[in-house]
Each structure stands twice: as structure tokens, then as C-alpha cells.
Image: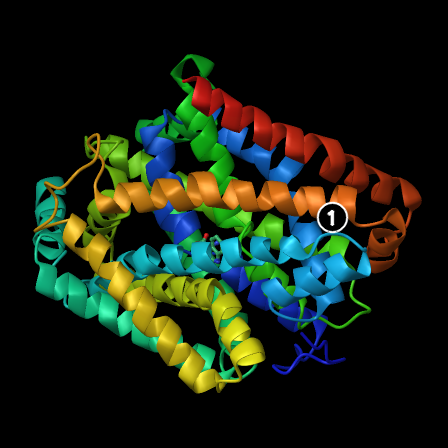
Amino acid sequence: MARPLQSIHGQWSSRWAFVLAATGSAVGLGNIWKFPYITGENGGGAFVLVYLACLVLIGLPVMMAEILVGRRGRQNPVNSLHSLAIEEKTTQDWQYLGWLGLTAGILIMSYYSVFAGQALAYVFRNFSGVFEGVTADGATSIYNALVSDPERLLAWHTIFVIITSIVVARGVQGGLEKAVKFLMPALLAILFLLVGYAANTGIYFQQGIDFLFHADFSKLSGDSVLTAMGHAFFTLSLGMGAIMVYGSYLPKSASILKMTFAIAFADTAVALLAGMAIFPLVFANGLDIDAGPGLIFHTLPIAFGHMQGGAFFGGLFFLLLVFAAWSSAISLIEPAVAWLVENKEVSRRRASVITGLVTWSLGLLTVFSFNIASEWTVFGNTFFDLLDYLTANIMLPLGGLLIAIFVGRIMSQDSSEKELNIKPQYLYSTWRFLIRYIAPAGIIIVFLNMLWN
Ligand code: TRP
């Protein structure tokens, strides 16, 4: 495997472009769709606290490690790990870690796209005004009508896979860099609007905030801890090489530490705001807090349905959500596409088509798990549940663990110190301590705890 000086698929135009793209990758359905519903299913505050702890102690150091490997390796995750393993004179089997990542990305994309498709459907639903004055039951049944119809769900899934593949085919600088710059602030503005709306629900707002921030550890099971840790990886796009491949397009001069903090801060803010908007509505309308993946589709239309100009704001909100999902989805398939381009000498366009077809086909499992195959379960879990568990709770933390071991223990201190170039020194030492001891131990303990249960 030759290692060209410059990777074939170019560079970000600036470090800001990288921060925007990585934030675009991090902020997605994970923040607005998944975070609220898993928090609802896992009892609230204590779960949130564990998630935040995992974010800081495991997520941040692993993110820095991934960017470091990408920037040093300058290629897709498989090749970058391969060439760094050679550089560090250790076994070349580390490239298989890249493979684990490529696979995880494709599996995640297969179901991510189905929910992004639902958000897309809701853009039109909101603009059309069907939610005007809607009741809680009404909103729930409109959602159920969508997911129980395999054809409609499939159509939206197909559209989302196509638009994602098109952007990836054009290369990352083309449209995405520009789009994210406007979309992220707009999304934030509408989230504030929604939190403002939720704040008007009086005692329910308080109840929602309590649910989110009041930690009651008796509600926490071993599996909740695993889910919280898995979500820390999921929401920051870690553990599968997405941020690594983005790092490979990064100029050498940028400060990895500062960028990592900026990305994680934005990501966390969006998730917490989404929770503050959604939980008060759940309580105010007597909805099920553990409604699962449909939660935002049950709750937010009620808020929009009772707001001045709600059809417009609702449509806009879901449109922005689709954009957030879009900029994330790109990073889910980029590692596989980069691998095809760099190793199989196919064009970016063809690589995107191939990856799109694979994810689309796998996505059928999720599409059907809500309707015709909803009865096919393993221990009560549908295909979607299993895919989600396997990827977010197992594959991502496992990928993160191996990255931490590679960067913290296999790579020489000299290499990581030069690449990170952090001043003052004690910050580097803190990072090194986290990546060598705390992050791996944390992941292993959570895994063992899961097996124990
Ligand atoms: N972080 C994104 C979200 O929160 C999802 C995502 C994009 C992702 N790329 C990833 C998750 C890579 C894991 C790995 O919606």
C-alpha cells in the first residue's frame, strides 16, 4: 500500500471548515431524536449524568486520538492505521480496526437513513398544516400511520440515501462546507424557540427540567450505563473512523485540542436544548416518556400545532433536522467511500453509488421492522433494536477502546506529542493519562458490567 504525500481526496479549505464539518457530523439525529428518547427510556437525570461523564472522560480523549491518527496517516482509516502501525513497527493487523469502523458506519447509516427519512416526511407534513391544533392522540396516530406503511417509509429512506450519496460523490468541499455554516445556527435558533415554547408550560417545564437534570441513581441499570456510554460515542461520531477520515483532510497547523472542545461543546448544547424542549411537552400532554424512537414525532407536532405560525416553524424545524442528519450521514459513509477510492481505484462517484446501494439494501431491515416484520423479534428485539444495540453499544465503544490502546500504548509518546502539539505540557499529560488509563478502563468496566448482568 503506497502512501502518497497528499491524500487523493483533498483537504479542508481551512481549519474552520473542519470544525464545521465535524460539528455537522456530530450534531444530528443523535442529539435531537435519539438523546431524548433514550433518556426517556432510561429514567432521566442519572442517565444524563453518566452520559456527560463518558463524554468528558472517554469521548474527548478518544476524539483527539482519532483526529491525530487521521491527520498523521492522511488516508482512509484502514490505510492510516496500517501505515501508522508500520511507522511504529508493530503488527499490521491494526488495519482491521479500520475495517471494524467501515462496517459500523455502513450498518449505522442503514437505519439512520430510515429515521432521517421520517424527518423528511415530517417536513411536508408540517408545512401542509395537518398538525394545526392537533391533540396528543392525533399526533401519535399520524406517526403510526407513517411507520406502519412500508411503501411510504421505503420511499423516504430511498430519497435520503440518494441525497447523501450525491453529496459524497461530489466531495466534501463542494456543497457541504458551505451549507453547514448557515444551517447549524438556524437549527440552534429554532431550538431556542421551542425551549421558549416549552417554558410556557409552567409546572411541566419544571418537571421536564427535573427529569433531565435530577439524578436518581436507583433508576439506573447496567444496561443504561452501557447505553449512555454508547451514546457518548454515537453523538460525537466516534469509534468508527468518521472523525478520523475528516482529520485526514486537516491542515497540520490546527490545534486538535481546541477544535475537539468546540465540537463537543456544540454537540452537547444541542442535545440538552432538545431535551429541554421535548420533556416538558411530554409531561404537559400526558405522553409516554418511554415511547422510544417515535418520541419527537409524537411531541413536537403538538407544540407546533398550537403555535402562531406553527406550520411554518414546524416545517422549518424538520427541514433543519434533515440537514443536520444529512451532514452526519455523509460522515457515516465517507470512510467506506474513501477506502474504495484510495484502494480500489474506483471514482468517487462510483464508490458513492456502491456504498449507497449497500446501505439502502440493509436499510430494508429497519424499514420492515416497523411494519411487516415487526413480529420478527429476538428476545423481544426487532431488527432495528438489534442493529442499534450492536452498533452503538458494542461496535463503537469497542472501536474506541482499540483506538485508545493504539494511540495511548502502541504509538510512541514522541509521535503523539508532536502530532498534538499541545501547550502547556500539563494538558498533554492529562490527555495522555486519560487515553492510557481512564478511557480504556472505563470502557472495559462498562463492558464487564454488561456481561455480568
Ligand atoms: N453523530 C451523529 C449524530 O449524533 C451520527 C453519526 C455520524 C455517527 N457519524 C457517525 C455516529 C459516526 C457514530 C459514528 O446523529
In front here: 319 or 102? 102
Residue 210 picture location, percent across and down: 42, 25
Image quadrant in which you'd find residue 329? bottom left
Which residue does the numbered mark 1 point to in the structure image? 407
In front here: 314 or 242? 242
Residue 299 shows in the view: no
Callout 1: few (<14), some (14-19), or many (20+) C-alpha neighbours within 10 Å?
A: many
**10 sits left or right of 193 in the view:** right
Q: Quadrant of the N terminus?
A: bottom right
Image quadrant in which you'd find residue 153? bottom left
| Residue in the picture at 68% in, 43% down | 404
| Residue in the picture at 43% in, 85% down | 349
Q: Quadrant of the C terminus?
A: top left
Residue 214 picture location, percent across and down: 46, 22
**255 sits left or right of 363 in the view:** right
| Residue in the picture at 65% in, 47% down | 403
In front here: 144 or 364? 364
| Residue in the picture at 32% in, 30% down | 41
Above or below, 211 relative to 298 = above
